[in-house]
Image (cartoon, rainbow, N blue to C red):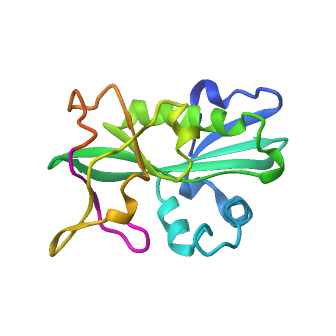
Amino acid sequence: MTQDAGPADAAVDGVTIRQLGSDDLGPDRLRAIRSLMDVAFGDDEEERFSEDDWQHAVGGRHFVLERDGGLLGHASVVERSLHVGGHPLRAGYVEAVAIQPTAQGRGLGSRLMAAVDAYIADAFELGALGTGRHRFYERLGWTTWRGPAFVRTPEGDRPTPDEEGYILVLETPSTPIRPLDLTAPLSCDWRPGDVW
């Protein structure tokens, strides 16, 4: 089933943002999105988009930015459980954000993220993502988490100091902790590959 993304689903300048579940994408669109990730993230060992990254991006809602049926951009939101100072929150975790390199610098990434942010604000207690591109997201209302980061494992919480300073959050109308202490410990559920 295709779910419209609301006003963002309307075509503007021939560009449409569609909101779809992973099962609604179909094999051709999934291949196109996976190829976009490879092109957008490149071959650099530190930056490249791995198979674990791809697995993290599926299973939630996909925001597909298209012009005339051609793929220009993508982002996905998957549900995760984040704990802020020990309090569990339902988080919309943003994955696989990319715009075709030839279409960058035209505001398409901001339009895509506006649809993503609206979905998170409506459906989750908190938005979160991991990135080194802070300025882009901060301009859209995201805030860098300043506290220590952990991953929850069967053996207990394990520090993830390499991720500290790279995690951003977005408060929503249903964020239950107000004010949100951005210096509190933040933990995520464990998953294969990059936990954040």
Determine the residue positioned at 29% across, 29% down: 174
121 or 159: nearer the eye?
A: 159
Do we see residue 196 in this rendering? Answer: no
Image quadrant assignment for residue 40: bottom right
4 or 111: nearer the eye?
A: 111
Compared to 167, does 35 lie above or below?
below
**Residue 155 lies in magenta, yes or no?**
no
Q: Where is residue 146 shown, x and y percent of the image? A: 32, 45
Q: Quadrant of the C terminus?
A: bottom left
Q: Where is residue 9 shown, x and y percent of the image? A: 66, 31
Is residue 188 rendered to the left or right of residue 122?
A: left
- Magenta part of the chain: 184-196
Image quadrant assignment for residue 25: bottom right
Is residue 104 rendered to the left or right of residue 3?
A: right
- Most common SS among magenta residues: loop
Do we see residue 123 in this rendering? Answer: yes
